[in-house]
Amino acid sequence: MAISPHPRTGLQMAYFRTWHDRVADPSKPNSFGEIPSEVDVAFVFPDFTPPENPFWQTLREQYVPALHEQGTAVARTTDISSLLNPDFPDTPSGNRALADHLVEQLVHAHGLDGLDVDMETRLSAEQAERATTVFHELSRLVGEESGTDTLLIYDTNLNGDQPVFRDTADLFDYVLVQSYGRSVDSLQPTWETFAPLIPAERYLIGFSFYEEFDRNRWDDTSEPFEDSRAVAYADWQPAGATKAGVFSYAIDRDGVPFLDDAITATDYPWTRRLGERLRSREG
């Protein structure tokens, strides 16, 4: 199940850290399956959750069906390095086999709706060429180019001038730019590096909830809500255009006060309020 109609505006997406799911770790209070319906795409952010962890069976058998029922699509996040896997030769057949492997293991095996590739590394020319090839192979299987009801998403903290993005931009359903802690004044210049390659309706900017013991201290979600960076991001639009929406990182920390390191249950108050705000301004 993909987002329909596609593309559209007023979207909210969110990354849930799997190691904070209470099936993955019974000491944790929150559940991936309880992400609210205000989230259009929920991302499985899978660190510290090995294949034998019971989270993965629960994800497929319980969480994904429940989220689909409320209209939330689910995608798996993987690092750009997975597109450079040396276990597969850098040949036409090897790169096709790598794309097949990634989609089978990261998407189909868990009944998910797509793949999100996290690009936070400046690749060498050789690496960029290979990643570009594998992205094109992936687009046979997931995303709008595949003709299937799935998503292929590019997620980055870099500008739009990276060679691999330049050569693959038309493959992605959505492009997510990690804008954690940035000033609102910086958003337009960043967008302008992407604007020659994608329409604004495929572009989202993201904030972070406060992660426990986080040295970055983005402070994107401090009260009052109306004065927060998260709300400013939801309201911001590229000059003369309308962006797809916003996303959050560490939604499992929704509502935690800045610098509060206690792990507590959430009912997703910020996500719900942002969803209302985005929907009220949609279109």
Image: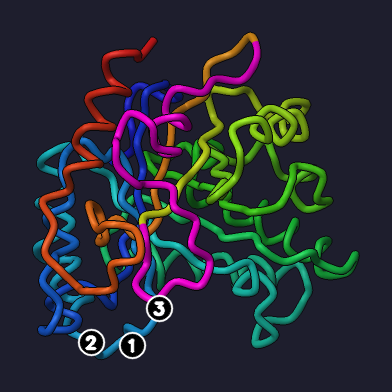
Pick the quarter of the image with the N terminus: top left
Label 1's element? loop
Kindly identify the residue that appears in the image at 68 percent across and 27 percent down: 188
The disc labelled 1 sits on which kind of residue?
Pro
For disc 1, the neighbor class at 10 Å (few under 14, some 14 to 19, many from 20) is: few
Residue at image point 28% right, 23% down: 277
Q: Amino acid at mark 3?
A: Asp
Question: Considering only vertical position in the picture, is 129 above or below 268?
Answer: below
Taken as a whole, is the magenta stretch helix, strand or loop?
Answer: loop
- Does residue 232 appear to the left or right of 84 in the view shown? left
Q: Nearer the viewer, residue 153 or 48?
A: 48
Q: Which corner quadrant holds the C terminus?
A: top left
Q: Residue 60 in the image: state x and y as whole percent.
A: 18, 66
Q: Is residue 213 magenta?
A: yes
Residues 86 and 263: in front is: 263
Q: Residue at x 65, y 55 (%)?
A: 135
Q: Secondary structure at mark 3?
A: loop
The residue where tag 2 is placed is 53
Q: Which residues are magenta?
A: 210-239
Instruction: Give whichever of 227, 23 is nearer the camera.
Output: 227
Q: Is residue 254 left or right of residue 45?
A: left
Asked if marks 2 and 1 touch (Cβ < 8 Å), the reply is: yes
Residue 23 on image: x %, y %: 13, 78
Mark 2 secondary-structure assignment: loop
Q: Which residue is mark 1?
A: 50
Q: CA distance from mark 1 to mark 3?
A: 8 Å
User: Hey, what amino acid is under mark 2?
Assistant: Asn
Marking on residue 47: 3
| Comparing labels 1 and 3, the label whose residue is closer to the camera | 3
Q: CA distance from mark 3 to mark 2?
A: 12 Å
Point 73% across, 63% down: residue: 131
